[in-house]
Image (cartoon, rainbow, N blue to C red):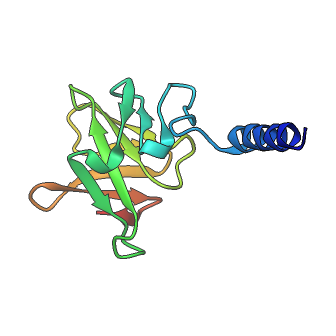
Amino acid sequence: MKKTILLSAMFLGTLVFAQQTPVLGGDKDAHGCIGSAGYTYSQIKKDCVRTFEEKIKLKEVATKGDYIAAVIFSKDKKNAEVFVKDAEGGSVILTRAGKSKAWKKDGYVLTPYKKSGYQLKKDNVVIYQ
């Protein structure tokens, strides 16, 4: 009888522990992107991406590179999706007007910088490059 009670208590304890342990990959967002695996949704690609794997990365100026912003361009280069830490929703879609060399929206301005880089300004202050 004591063995049955002991085994039952152990079984119930295991069930309680199993329900409290988060499942890896169980943190999918509305688009099915798994945040714990580094994925976030890209509005331009219409898919989950890992921003740290993107080709264009900018370093935050204020922290001397502690934070990284990623940039993804649309195929026609008319839109640029910028992933910055303080953006609501994780990213901001900037638009280029005509043949301008700048993409803009809500105080953000992305421009070519040096030979192959880009610079991002917020309210005319350089925040990433």
Residue 109 lies, in percent from the top left, at 37, 51
Indicate the quadrant where residue 57 lies: bottom left
Residue 62 lies, in percent from the top left, at 42, 74
Please indicate whether residue 127 sits to the left or right of residue 12 in the image: left
| Residue located at (44% from left, 52% from top) | 84
Task: Note whether 126 is above or below 23 in the view shown.
Answer: below
Indicate the quadrant where residue 76 lies: top left
Residue 34 lies, in percent from the top left, at 48, 36
Task: Note whether 2 is above or below 68 in the view shown.
Answer: above
Of 81 and 42, nearer the camera is 42
Of 115 and 26, nearer the camera is 26
Q: Residue furthest left?
A: 115
Please indicate whether residue 30 sits to the left or right of residue 96 in the image: right
**How many marks can you see?**
0
Q: Residue furthest front?
A: 1
Of 53 and 23, nearer the camera is 23
- Quarter of the image containing the C terminus? bottom left
